[in-house]
Amino acid sequence: MIALEIQAYNNKQTTVDQKICEILATTISSELVEAESKIWHAHPVWFLNGNPIVGYSKQKTGLRLMFWSGASFEDEKLNVIGAKFKDASVFYTKIEEVNINDLKRWLKKSKEIQWDYKNIVKRKGKLERLL
């Protein structure tokens, strides 16, 4: 089930982006049933034990789906931008670009491979891998 605040975020998007948001939110919520979801830093994010796992946001180049630990997934379809953090993203501009099999594979990896963003401030910016 999609949280009301996430549904409200989705409803504010263009018609095309609403469809992309809907499929992302529905798939993420069904695959990460144990996750808490909320609007965090102005966009939808799912957390496992307080650690951010996946989220999406509207950007100039399209709808960005980001996995906080995605760089460690070693998946060529995910773009790794920086070296300091372990995030990786994919951008969508059309509903047809969303590959459910890829999304489910990444969500499975997001449960298995996590970096501890929850305690990054306490560790003065140093990330540690969670087991």
Image (spheres, rainbow, N blue to C red):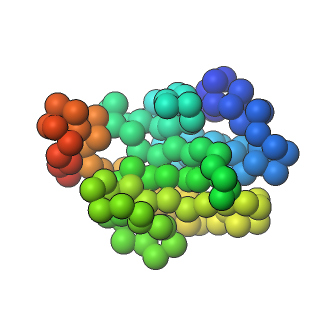
Of 51 and 111, which appears nearest the observer? Answer: 51
Which one is in front, 60 or 63?
Answer: 60
Q: Is residue 87 visible?
A: yes
Q: Position of residue 30 (x, y in %)?
A: 58, 43
* Count of picture labels: 0
**x and y percent of residue 79 in the render?**
47, 67
- Specify whether 129 is left or right of 62: left
Vertical relation: 25 (above or below) 80:
above
Q: Residue at x 59, y 66 (%)?
A: 101
Q: Quadrant of the image for the N terminus?
A: top right
Vertical relation: 95 (above or below) 49: below
Outermost residue toward the top in this view: 4
Check the image and report above or below for 14 versus 43: below
Residue furthest front as drawn: 60
Residue at 32% from the left image edge and 32% from the top image edge: 49
Q: Position of residue 59 (x, y in %)?
A: 63, 49
Extreme residue toward the left, this view? 123
The residue sitting at 66% across, 23% down in the picture is 4
| Residue 116 image point, x, y percent | 25, 43
Q: Name the foreground residue: 41 vs 4.
A: 41
Residue drawn at x 39%, y 39% is 52
Image position of 43 (left or right of 85): right
Whether residue 109 is visible here, answered yes or no, is: no
125 up-or-down from 95: above or below? above
Q: Residue furthest right?
A: 15
